[in-house]
Image (cartoon, rainbow, N blue to C red):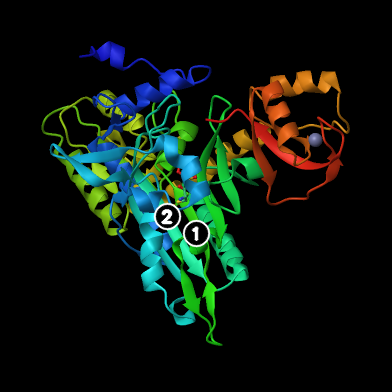
């Protein structure tokens, strides 16, 4: 058990991100990391509520055009092994079930690392004619990956508990490409609502999803200067359709392979909300995802404080009726202890009401994102709370955006072999993202990665693409982003 004074020390975030992150997960009661299996953690009730709000947004966006389904966790070995590229990419990461009791299974069963090979054999029987297309489904499930890199709560898991995977099938490549655009739009909206800034790149060919034609990725920047991949969208083309024989009868009676996409997001989205917005007092939650948006704290000096309590109850009712997620903290702790707790939990807005406020028919609003305090007339409390939450939502976004974009360094190097520039780049890439000219050969890519001790994220999908010369070999090249990645 920690003593009171210890638990109230501020948590320095700058230059201390790793420690800050673990401490916040514990103190804000997001995850319990004491489960005795590596890379596997327990959601606390409060963390799970945060997850629920985040995933409610994702579900609502997905439900627009996709149907939710639920496929089995177990995948027979022969299905998993069918797609050659796919299994090459995953075979070292698969957990296997090989026994039932003491009996060896005839066919070993894999715990899904992702569900292509569970879903596509079923697509084969679901899809008959062009009228069955497009087929768009998603599920939110746990998946298992035997990660050998350093595991980290919510970020690199062996049991990913909240894997949202979408799988779509289309008549033509053009339709599949259109779906990729739709997926980008959905993910943009999603991360915008979380106030999580991102860059979108096309991964280099050697780093695409195993079995895909190409992979687009959303990356955000973590406080320690490393990027984290928070979502990926893959154009699968016909490769899985050929392997799993997924065909439809076209209008002219001919049989055609479907064209596919898949795209996924994990609880890294929750990790990014926590990491990017939090400060030395704890979480800072965007109102859109905060389990509690407003906490009301009565400032009473005696057990009787009847007037204050009545006023608080009335404000609580009013906020609830206005559709806001309010909580009235009637516990017997002192106000200071309550402030500490709700700041740690990231509640966007606190309303304090004491006898002095009541004399002026007012209350005090305190914002979590910047601790600004204002007096607000009680009669306008719901309206003012709504606009305060909107303001907080957009201020958090603005701040996060500025932080990310201030940490992108654009190299002006117009040619290879400029050693000074490499020195600058090595320094800059420790703080964030660098943008430089690179040709698309794997050789130059690997050279650069080694020399900067960083990874190529890929070519940004939007913005003006200028042409230059490869920083390694001087051949024709395009701008790519490079960063040290999680
Ligand atoms: N089938 C495709 C699309 S659903 C797929 O599995 N893509 S993926 O491998 O790129 O994973 C999707 C997203 O899950 C990644 O972008 C990343 O944000 C997240 N992710 C991948 N591995 C882990 C892991 N071990 N722990 C937490 N999140 C992960
Ligand atoms: Zn090159």
The answer to whether marks 1 and 2 mark residues whose Cβ atoms lie closer than 8 Å is yes
Residue under numbered circle 2: 116
Residue 12 is left or right of residue 429, and the answer is left
Crowd around label 1: few <14 · some 14–19 · many ≥20 (10 Å):
many
Residue 317, percent from left and from top:
23, 53
Crowd around label 2: few <14 · some 14–19 · many ≥20 (10 Å):
many
Measure the alpha-carbon separation of dots 1 and 2. Answer: 8 Å
| Residue name at image x 60 percent, y 27 percent | 484
Residue 215, percent from left and from top:
59, 49
Q: On the rendering, which quadrant does ligand 1 occupy?
A: top left
Q: Specify whether tag 2 is near ligand 1 (CB below 8 Å).
A: yes
Does the image show residue 40? yes
Residue under numbered circle 1: 240
457 vs 486: above or below = below
Q: Nearer the viewer, residue 258 or 20?
A: 258
Residue 130, percent from left and from top:
49, 80
Residue 336 is left or right of residue 265, and the answer is left
107 vs 146: above or below = below
Q: Which mark is residue 455?
A: none
| Residue name at image x 20 percent, y 47 percent | 313
- What secondary structure is marked by label 1? helix
Residue 317 is left or right of residue 13, and the answer is left
């Amino acid at each position: 058990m920690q003593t009171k004074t210890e638990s109230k020390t501020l948590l320095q975030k700058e230059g201390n991100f790793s420690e800050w992150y673990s401490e916040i997960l514990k103190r804000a009661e997001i995850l319990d990391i004491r489960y005795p299996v590596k890379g596997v953690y327990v959601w606390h009730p409060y963390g799970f509520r945060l997850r629920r709000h985040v995933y409610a947004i994702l579900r609502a966006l997905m439900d627009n055009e996709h149907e939710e389904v639920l496929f089995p966790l177990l995948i027979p070995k022969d299905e998993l092994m069918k797609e050659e590229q796919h299994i090459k990419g995953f075979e070292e990461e698969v957990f296997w079930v090989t026994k039932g009791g003491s009996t060896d299974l005839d066919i070993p069963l894999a715990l899904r690392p992702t569900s292509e090979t569970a879903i596509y054999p079923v697509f084969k029987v679901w899809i008959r004619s062009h009228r069955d297309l497009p087929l768009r489904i998603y599920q939110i499930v746990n998946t298992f990956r035997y990660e050998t890199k350093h595991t980290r709560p919510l970020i690199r898991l062996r049991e990913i508990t909240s894997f949202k995977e979408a799988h779509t099938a289309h008549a033509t490549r053009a339709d599949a490409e259109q779906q990729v655009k739709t997926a980008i739009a959905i993910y943009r909206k999603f991360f915008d609502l979380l106030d999580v800034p991102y860059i979108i790149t096309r991964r280099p060919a050697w780093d695409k999803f195993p079995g895909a034609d190409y992979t687009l990725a959303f990356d955000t920047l973590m406080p320690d200067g490393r990027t984290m991949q928070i979502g990926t969208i893959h154009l699968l083309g016909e490769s899985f359709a050929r392997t799993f024989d997924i065909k439809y009868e076209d209008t002219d009676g001919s049989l055609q392979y479907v064209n596919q996409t898949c795209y996924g997001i994990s609880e890294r989205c929750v990790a990014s909300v926590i990491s990017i917005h939090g400060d030395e007092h704890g979480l800072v939650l965007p109102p859109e995802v905060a389990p509690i948006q407003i906490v009301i704290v009565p400032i009473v000096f005696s057990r009787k404080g009847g007037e204050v309590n009545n006023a608080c109850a009335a404000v609580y009712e009013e906020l609830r009726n206005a559709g806001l997620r309010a909580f009235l903290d009637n516990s017997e702790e002192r106000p200071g202890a309550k402030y500490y707790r709700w700041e740690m939990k990231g509640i966007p807005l606190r309303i304090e009401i004491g006898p002095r406020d009541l004399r002026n028919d007012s209350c005090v609003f305190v914002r979590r994102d910047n601790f600004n305090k204002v007096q607000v007339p009680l009669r306008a409390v719901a309206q003012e709370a709504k606009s305060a939450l909107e303001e907080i939502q957009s201020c958090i976004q603005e701040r996060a955006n500025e932080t990310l974009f201030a940490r992108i360094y654009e190299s002006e190097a117009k040619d290879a072999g400029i050693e000074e520039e490499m020195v600058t780049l090595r320094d800059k890439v420790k703080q964030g993202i660098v943008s430089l000219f690179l040709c698309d050969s794997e050789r130059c890519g690997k050279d650069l990665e080694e020399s900067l001790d960083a990874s190529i994220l890929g070519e940004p999908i939007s913005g003006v693409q200028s042409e230059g010369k490869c920083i390694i070999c001087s051949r024709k090249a395009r701008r790519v982003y490079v960063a040290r990645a999680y």
